[in-house]
Image (cartoon, grey):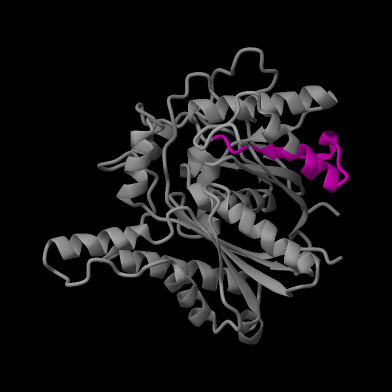
Amino acid sequence: MNKVYITGSSIISALGNNKKDSVKKIQEITDDNYFEYLKDNFQELKYYQIKKNFVSNEEKFYSILEEVVLKAIEDAKLSKDEAKELHIFLGSTSMSISIVEEQHLKYKKGQSSDEIKNIGYGEIGNFIENLISSKYKSTIIQTACTSSANAICHASDFIKNNKIKRALVIGFEFFNYTTYRGFQSLMLLSKSGEYKPFDINSDGLILGEACSAVILESEKKEENDFEILSSSNSFDSYSVTSSNPNGEVTLSCMEEALNKANLSIDKLTCLKAHATGSENSNLSEVVAIDKLFKKYNQKTDVVILKPYIGHTLGACGTNEIVLLCESIKNSFLPKTINFYEKYNNINFTPLLKSKEIDKATILFHFIGFGGSNTSMILSNES
């Protein structure tokens, strides 16, 4: 069975328009200046925004996709012929709804005779295929907030089993009113406008937009490339929109990833929690992690990234993997910002001070609407 490595990556988010700027910004943000960072992001709506100007949502969508894809390919040092051999996997929740909304508004204003731009999302796949002259059709994965994480798992399994040679996995989420109003109607958005995941006083989540990509190959290019050691998936049938407060399905998913990698908790550098900030999801995941630590009488650092970029839904898999792996390559484990008070009867708090580190073994966990749970273990330790 082949090994699988992340040999290239790229990201554009509220933190910055490339990996270098994003990592630098993570280091600069503290509890003291966090509200200034939020103020800089939020305009009419409380939403972590990509700071780039475009004439339309369509231009924004495809320009950012193109930039992220080409930068990831460049980062992996792939030739044009090697890029043609990439199998493409797309993971997103809202896909191109921002373009659909824009087109419908044009129609209502009498600026277009077409009420809708495209039916389905094949146009996105076609765009990437043509951009890199791919020999293969794209695979689209939509499993709510685990979409791009599951896209990585799926592509990784293909490479491990020698079914494909290399893969391009893209996670993307762009602002649209349909998604925003949907979360608003479920009363999941933070009223205070500050992100406090895993804090007992959290009052909800804050959405964000971002786009990222990773290149997966069976041989590493650089000494510090991260290997995907294992992955696991499970489904919580408790509710379509909420997790079982006992956290058992999340617990079993993390355990399975550890077992597949033949690792104990004490061998982990950290656990990257999903930590949406919504009341139910927060409590369920906190309980699951606490049970994991108590069951094996072992702990590891818990890292939370959403206060930096917002909840980027289906794209959070690639986004948070790129950000955390790149931070570690830049010799630090990011602190959790804006955390003050843990839940009752919970024996851990997230990492509150950044740590100097350049090698790591990480358990990533992601949770999605509909009960999807995804865990992955990545490592750049020899």
Measuring from the top left, give residue 203's x and y in whole percent. Answer: 43, 25
Give left or right: position of 333 versus 16.
right
Q: How many marks?
A: 0
- Percent x, y for residue 145? 53, 47
The answer to whether one can see residue 240 in this image is yes
In which quarter of the view is residue 300 placed?
top right
- Image quarter of residue 364: top right
Q: Which residues are magenta?
A: 253-275
Q: Is residue 33 visible?
A: no
Q: Please identify the residue farthest to the top as the structure is shown.
A: 344
Residue at 78% of width from left, 44% of height from top? 257
Rendered view: 66 above or below 172: below
Residue 311 place in picture, x, y as percent = 48, 42
Residue 131 versus residue 283: which sits nearer the camera? 283
Between 31 and 92, the residue placed more toward the observer is: 92
Quadrant assignment for the C terminus: bottom right
The residue sitting at 78% across, 37% down in the picture is 255
Instruction: From the viewer's perspective, tell me whether residue 156 is left or right of residue 149.
Output: right
Nearest the camera: 102 or 325?
102
94 vs 139, left or right, is: left
- Examine the rendered structure and indicate whether residue 75 appears above or below residue 42: below
The residue most toward the bottom is 81
Residue 267 placement (x, y as % from top left): 84, 39
Magenta stretch contains residue 143: no
Residue placed at 41% from the left, 66% from the top?
Answer: 120
Q: Residue at x 57, y 33 (%)?
A: 336
Position of the N terminus, as image quadrant, is bottom right
Query: Looking at this rendering, what residue extends furthest in the left direction?
Result: 110
Viewer-side residue, 84 vs 329: 84
Above or below: residue 79 compared with residue 73: below
